Image: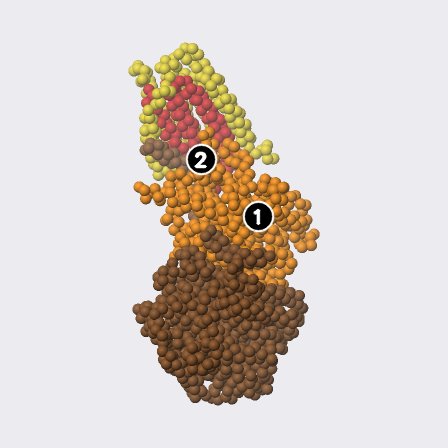
Chain colours: A red, B brown, C orange, D yellow
Amino acid sequence: MLAESLALTAALFVIGVIGVLIHRNAIIIFMCVELMLTAVNLTFVAFSRFYGTAGQVFVVFVMTVSAAEAAVGLAIIIAIFRHRQTIDLKDINLLKG
Amino acid sequence: MLLQTAVSAASQAHPLSGTIAEWVWLLPILPLAGFVINGLLSLAGAHFGPTDPTAAEHEHHSEGAADASAISHAGHGADGDDQHAVKRHRWAGVVSVVGPGVLILSFLLALGIWQAMASAQPAAPFIQRYFSWMPVGDLHIDAAFQLDQLSMLMILVITGVGALIHVFSVGYMRDDPGYPRYFSYLNLFVFFMLVLVLGANYPVLFVGWEGVGLCSYLLIGFWFNDKANADAGKKAFIVNRIGDFGLLVAMFMLFANIGVLDFIGVSAKALDLGAGSALVTTICLFMFLGCTGKSAQIPLYIWLPDAMAGPTPVSALIHAATMVTAGVYLIARSSFLFSLSPVASLTVAVVGAVTAIFAATIGLKQWDIKKVLAYSTISQLGYMFVGVGVGAYVSGMFHLVTHAFFKALLFLGSGSVIHAMHAAYHRTHSNEDAQDMRNMGGLRRYLPVTCVLMWIATLAISGIPPLSGFMSKDEILGSVFARAQGSTLASATWLGIPGSTLLYIIYAIGLAAAFLTAVYMTRMMLYTFHGPARTGTEEEEALHEAPWIMTGPLVVLGILTVFGGWLNLPEVITGIIPLGPRELLAHWLDPVVGDATTRIAAGAAQVPASTEQALIGAAVVIAVAGIVFAMTRLKPDRLPRKRDAVPEHGFEGVVAHKYYVDEGIERTIVEPTYAVSRSFLWRVIDNGLIDGFFVNGSAALARGLGWVGSRLQTGNVGIYAWVLVVGVLVMLGAFTLR
Amino acid sequence: MASFLDSIGYNLWVLPALLAIPLVGAVIVLMLPVREPAATAAGVETPAARQVALWLFVLEFVVSIGLWWSFNPADTGWQAPIDIGWIPTWGVRFTLGVDGIALMMVLLTTFIMPLSVLGSWTTIRTKVRSYYALLLILTTGMLGVFLARDLFLFYVMWEVMLVPMYFIIGVWGGERRIYASLKFFIYTMLPSLLMLVAIIYLGLHMKGADGTPDFSYDRLLTGAVGMPERTALWLFAAFFLAFAVKVPIFPFHTWLPDAHVEAPTAGSVILAGIMLKMGTFGFLRFALPLFPGAAMNPTIRMIILILALIGIIYGALVAMVQPDFKKLVAYSSVSHLGFVMLGIFALTLQSVQGALMVMINHGISTGALFLLVGIMYERRHSRLIDSYGGIARVAPMFAAILTFVSLSSIGLPGTNGFVGEFLVLIGSFRTYPVLTIIATTGVIFAAVYLLWAIQRILFNPLDKAENEHLTDLNKRELAMLVPLVAAIIWLGVYPAPVLRRMEGSAQLLVNRVERAGSLPRVSEAGR
Amino acid sequence: MEPHYSLIYVFHFYLFGVIALASALTFVTRKSPVTAALWLVNTMFSLAALYVMLDAQFVGVMQVLVYAGAIMVVFLFVVMLLNLGHPSELADARGTGWKLAAGLIGLGLLSEIMVIARTKLPQQLIVPRDFNEQQFQKLNAVGMIAEPLFKDYLLAFELTSVLLLVAITGAVVLGRGRAAGAR
């Protein structure tokens, strides 16, 4: 089932990417990022059948990181929203050089 | 101490060692000491002189009641370099002793050395090595002096005539504020000139060669606050530099091919270059380029007329008697090279002849008394080059010596005239030109001594026997004729012309130039001293003969002019009239140039005495004809004054404007060089292409790329995401397609 | 003298001392208590700094002058050598040594520096301590470049030299100082980095059995010769660029006029007098002996020679039309350094020795010219030639010295300028006669531009009211110019001692490059 | 290489796979964050099932707990907190051109990943076929993960905990806003 898993991973990942590209809502973009991370997890798990349980350990790490990321990211969104009353990426251009 | 040890080591068995000749180093050192003393006095006087600005202001406006410095350009209100122009320089007394004093001492020493030399009769040059100047590998250049008959002759002329001119200057420059500076330059000049003639190798000669150029530059521009003078000095230096370039290249070629640069070594190895080879011809031609610069021959003669901007004694010493003859000296010195190359020798002769006639024609139409003499000098130098060019080195040197006498006399005489004229115009506060002959006339009444002496010199330069000029000029023409009859020159071809034909043409040109010389010199004398006075009635009262300190040297030079010919009485004359011992100079110089002369004259047929006498007769007739022609055709009493003069037209105008050579060079070389340098090289290439395009262009490119990059930074995170994804796509694509 | 020097162990400590004195001195100068300009007599902030700096430089000169006697001309190896470990893991050693080529450069440096302090005596009024501290650090850098026998050390010193000069131009310079200093820095830094790459490559190329790189110059001399020709070519190109910009060779010269014009007087003096020599010194020390095959490649050699030739003529022509006297002198440097390059790449004993002489002479004459420009500028606040005219009348001593120095720059025989140019040309003529003849015309142009300039400054009518009360040189200015004038005469009349000291090293260089440079050609012919 | 799978296993595998894919597609096309979040939860659940099927029972449980249970809930909290649930405010998707371009980029990316996924696996890393089986027997489902986690990857684990701590602190600081800090 490795090939199928990998194909599914690729599809989910790409869907995540497309989501990031087409959305302007910061929260949805975040969700898309989560989807991409999860897709990668599937790869780890699929490969762990052949390469041992280390892959699953990495999944744990990835989850931790994504949890941390979600926490901080959402906190930032809240802070921005407080500041500018929007989470539309079009209106958030503070990084302008 | 260094000098003494070196001296004793270097000279062992030479007949002159142990004699007074060992003191030869003192010859140039004396004038050098004079330069240092006078120079320091000049600066000291300037530095500690009165610095009260109001006083300076006042003097500036009053133009200095007795400002003799304005002599050579009356009415331009020129003044010296110092603020207290009214009084003589505070150190003038000391300078008057030191300046001429060192020269007189030098001359006495030279006489002593000459005495020793005459009794020792050395066959080989006496070489004194003092220290190693540029020792690099196989290049050995010593600071060494070489004393032989040729340099001895030059030393006597330089110190002798030099001392006379120094004494004259004491009177002439008496009231100039730059008095110490003047003498320091003049002493420095003599130092360099002595180095030039004493140098035992080409580089040491070159030190003197450029050094005299420097002094010429400084002295031409002595009254530097007048732009014309400064320009003239600069022009002299730069034109000389072009010539020096030739001399340098000649030295390089000598070193590259025979590995030595001292005269003894080169003369020993000269044959290795191959007689008549292209190499030796090239070397000689480059060397001759140097001579044309220093000795004002075509094409580099243009600086000498302008050089008349300097004080008149300077013109006498540097631009007539000594420095300008350095080129002749160099060719005589390098006779071992020139005699190997008939082509180069013929070139020298041709250039000399063409210069002689060319300058003589210009001399016909000059109004400035010093300009006439300047062109006359160029013309006479042409004669000398004809002499050394045809391998008659003795004749060339002989003419050099006699020319030093009579031309110095003429220049100093003109100095005396100008001195008088200037004083006269100064008294009446007139702005007339004190050097223009159209403002003179009838001066013989006021300047009788000067007039007589200048007439003697004029007759000498015109070639009237038995004056010195006749002897030397005739000898050159006779040599040309003899060489044409048969010699290595006659059998060579020059640019396709057979040598003998060429020599006959040169002889003809020489005769023609002699005629013109007689004409323009007589013209100068007539307009200056005869006819009615055009000076103006008020001024005439002020005209007076120069003081004894100026006329004294004139008289000495007059005597030398008359009897200078006895130095080398030709056989033809002694055969008819037993005036004295014959060909003294030829015997004297034989150890130096004898071999070279023999080499060039190889295969010469003896010219019959009758032919020689006929030639002499022809020359005298031509000279007399010239004088008579000028006397009959020129009407001094009808000459308008300068301010009433109408400009000449047609060919006369062209001649009066010196064939527009200066203007031509200015238009075709000088101005285009400046224009190209400024508008193209500097503005376009340097500022535009290299700095603007490449250097600042690359900076602008970097800045531009940075600007483009900064435009990508919209600050919109969405766009960043797009960029990121596209980047990932590209990179993964690169992996995929690998 | 030599025995006295031996008795104090001179050779053992002189080179480190030469590098250490300025560094310690910089610290001392920086620690001086500040005095406000208003509180001092001359209106100069902390005047003690300049005095301390002057005496330090005099001390440095006194220490260095012993080398003149302790140096043994017969010995072509390193003298007074120092070899201490520095960064062992990179194989970098702190090795110093002096040979005939470096000796004169070191003495030139220590000779010029005190004079340049005198030259900035009254013109530097602000941040005085930093200024003199930078001058001192700069000295260490320059001497380090001349003395280093380790390529890494050499590079470090090379960059140490760059930074103080950047600040000297950028802080105490003229109106466009920021532009000039940036240009100077980037222009010289960029190819220096290429050189760093080449140096690292060489170090790795020479690495020992344990894998430690080796930057030792002496080892590279033998080791680098066997390098493949293409590699050597690339490495030579890197070194060439770094040195060519420093020289500067046409067309890499445009930083020079800007830097010179904007730099304060002492900056110009040091830049022209010493730092330009770094490039030519680099060619002599590194680029030629390390890559003789590449340097003596006929095509490359011809290209460099032609660039040198263009520099001679072009520099002179452009100098001729400069309205700014300082810029004129700057462009004249391009011309003079062209002679040096010609001499180096013509590669005969005479031409190389001549090139070394020109380097020394240019340092002295051009240094003096810049000091004189500084004196003019201090009085009238203008460098434009047209602002002057006829000032020989009011400032005769200034005029005498300016004329004399110009003549030495023109190459009048009897002055130092002639000896160098003559030797370069006479030596080059042996290998490249036609090019040399063209180069010799440079002596004409030199006369044209300098004489024209000094005519317009010193001579001609005194027609500007501001110039009528110019003061002549004062004692301090005389004190800084007289040594230079004396050096000009000495080197012009009796250069033999200098030539003798350089001859061994120059001969060694010529032999080494000729021998190694001819190897590939011989083998090609063999094939 | 791969073990033989029963039909029912394959069927279920494909079933959950299709559900995950479909939910993900739906998720990405929703404009309302709440709807999107719920569809995403659905994807997560399907993936958890797949994990279990791939013998990663612990990870499957974690997936449900952490993703579906914790992270997505936080998302929804934020949406509610900011009151962003109304579709009227969510006309946020980009224009058709952008969408088309995104689709194309997605296709390109997909094809690239598929190509890369065909790379041969490094054989020397492969563990024996029954390795996981034995681990499972020996250590049970949790121990199978815990052993390497607390032995081989202990440092990484500790660092992760620090990361979480930092994240929590950061979230708290950001979430409090300027209120306490500035005033």
Residue sitting at 42 percent across and 29 percent down?
Answer: A33
On the image, which quarter does residue A30 sit in?
A: top left
Give the number of the disc on residue C68.
Answer: 1
In the image, residue B401 above or below residue B253: below
- In the image, taking residue B677 as reference, residue B35 lies left or right, namely right
Q: Residue at x 51, y 61 (%)?
A: B14
Return the disc, 1 or 2, that comes first in the chain's sequence. 1
Please tell me how many numbered marks the rendered image carries. 2
Q: Chain of mark 1?
A: C
Closer to viewer: mark 1 or mark 2: 1
Query: What chain letter is assigned to the residue under label 2?
Result: C
Q: Find disc 2 in the rendering and name its residue.
A: C206
Q: Secondary structure at mark 2?
A: loop
Left or right of residue C124: residue B669: left
Above or below, comparing residue C388 to residue B480 in the picture: above
Question: Residue B662: image x %, image y %?
Answer: 43, 72
Q: In this rendering, would D131 be left or right of A92?
A: left
Query: In which quadrant will I find the C terminus of chain B?
Result: top left
